[in-house]
Amino acid sequence: MPKAIWNGAVLAESDKTIVIEGNHYFPPDSINWDYFQPNNHTTVCPWKGVANYYDVVVADKVNRSAAWYYPKPSAAARQIKNYVAFWHGVKVVEGEGETAVGNSLLAKIRALLG
């Protein structure tokens, strides 16, 4: 199950992530909100829309704009509304510390291996 980890803390964990462009988007109910502080940073994706950002704060260390989400995504990206993705050193791992791969690819590999 994919987990987002930074500074020793599990920020999110879910087997229902959506992978887009290599990023795991975690459902809102899988997020440990104690580590998140909204900020004013935004960016625009041509097909997903305007992304808002969170600072991630763990043990008094701040990772600025390390998480983002789309509160009002375009119709093409509606399935990731309010789902949270990570960067800036936040590691998304599968199982025991292995780097996560896209769920669809992982499912195909598991099916091939039986």
Image: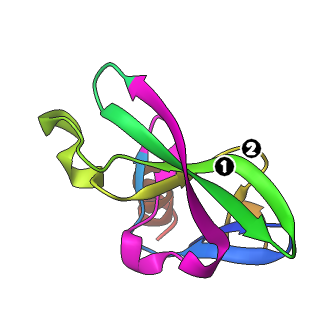
Is 22 one of the magenta-colored residues?
yes
* Front residue of this view, candidates 27 and 64: 64
**Label 1, on which residue?**
66
Q: Is residue 92 left or right of residue 42?
A: right
Which percent across, then down, holds residue 58? 79, 72
Residue at position x 51%, y 75% from top? Answer: 31
From this view, report whether residue 86 is shown above or below residue 10: above
Q: Is residue 38 visible?
A: yes
Image height check: is 97 above or below 68?
Answer: below
Viewed as shown, does residue 91 lie left or right of 46?
A: right
What kind of residue is marked 1?
Ala
In 3D space, how far apart are the residues under numbered discs 1 and 2 (Cα atoms)? 5 Å
Image location of residue 27, percent across then percent down: 38, 68
Which sits in the foreground, 107 or 89?
Answer: 89
* Secondary structure beneath label 2: loop
27 inside magenta stretch: yes
Which stretch appears magenta?
20-44
Name the residue tied to disc 2: 88
Q: Quadrant of residue 99?
A: bottom right
Which residue type carries mark 2? Answer: His
Residue lying at 69% horizontally and 61% vertically, measured from the top left: 56
**Where in the figure is residue 29, as x and y percent of width and height?**
39, 79
- Image position, residue 81 (x, y; %): 27, 54
